Each structure stands twice: as structure tokens, then as C-alpha cells.
Amino acid sequence: MVAITHGHSDHIGGIHVVLNNSRPRELGVGALPRTESIEALMNYANSLGVRVVRHNDAEILELGGIRAEVFSPPAAWVASSQARNNHSLVLQRSAITGATRAQRRN
């Protein structure tokens, strides 16, 4: 998974290159406004076969042996018409699973 924190241009400006070069299965997002640049990014991700998934608070993500908890945004949060810091996807890595440690030994 590749994640973008929020929709400001300095946070999504180079994401097209990252998506093209890494081809993740998922683009994780928070509450994003439906601006022209965000819509173009979502369409580009979809054209590469990358699923765009909104994550919300209280979710636990298992990411290749790393567990992360989503702290924000709340599920009911509605983005305003422009990108704001308050729309941010906030994750905290909470643990590395035993499987990853075992894989590193092999």
C-alpha cells in the first residue's frame, strides 16, 4: 500500500511517479475533497489497476507483516471542497508480526 496523507499539492505532486514505478495494490487515502487534481489522481490510480481505499479511524491494517492503526479521519468525516490538513489520513505502526521476523531469517 502507498498512502497519501491529504490532498495538498505538496503531498500528492509526485505520487503519480510512485504509483507508476511501484504499482502497489492499494492507494490508501483519508477524507479527500473532490477537486480536479484529486479526481485525476484517482483516475490514474484506477488506470494502473491500483485500488483507491478510504481508511477511517479504528481500522487496523496488516501491511506485509506490519500492523498499523488508523487514527484519523473519522468514518463520518466529510471533506470540504478544498484540501485541508484536518482531512489527513493518520496511521501509527503498532507492531511487526512474527511472520515477518521468520521471513527475514529465511
Image (cartoon, rainbow, N blue to C red):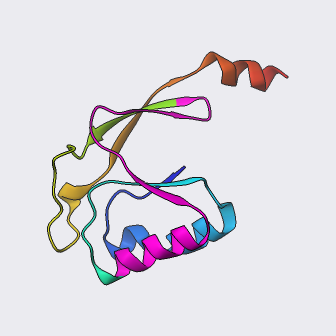
Where's residue 55, x and y in %? 35, 46
Q: How many marks?
A: 0
Where's residue 80, x and y in %? 14, 67
Give the residue drawn at x 44%, y 70%: 42
Give the residue drawn at x 32%, y 61%: 6
Q: Provide the residue span drawn in magenta.
A: 37-66
Q: Quadrant of the C terminus?
A: top right
Q: In terms of image quadrants, where is residue 102?
A: top right
Where's residue 101, x and y in %? 69, 20
Q: Decide: is 21 above or below 76.
A: below
Residue 52 among magenta residues: yes
Give the residue drawn at x 42%, y 80%: 40
Furthest-bottom residue in this view = 36
Q: In terms of image quadrants, where is residue 96?
A: top right
Decide if residue 13 is in sight here: no
Q: In terms of image quadrants, where is residue 97?
A: top right
Residue 57 among magenta residues: yes
Decide if residue 101 is in sight here: yes
Q: Nearer the viewer, residue 80 or 46?
A: 46
Q: Is residue 96 left or right of 13 when viewed as pictured?
A: right
Where's residue 53, x and y in %? 42, 53
Q: Is residue 75 left or right of 17 when viewed as pictured?
A: left
Q: Nearer the viewer, residue 55 or 4?
A: 55
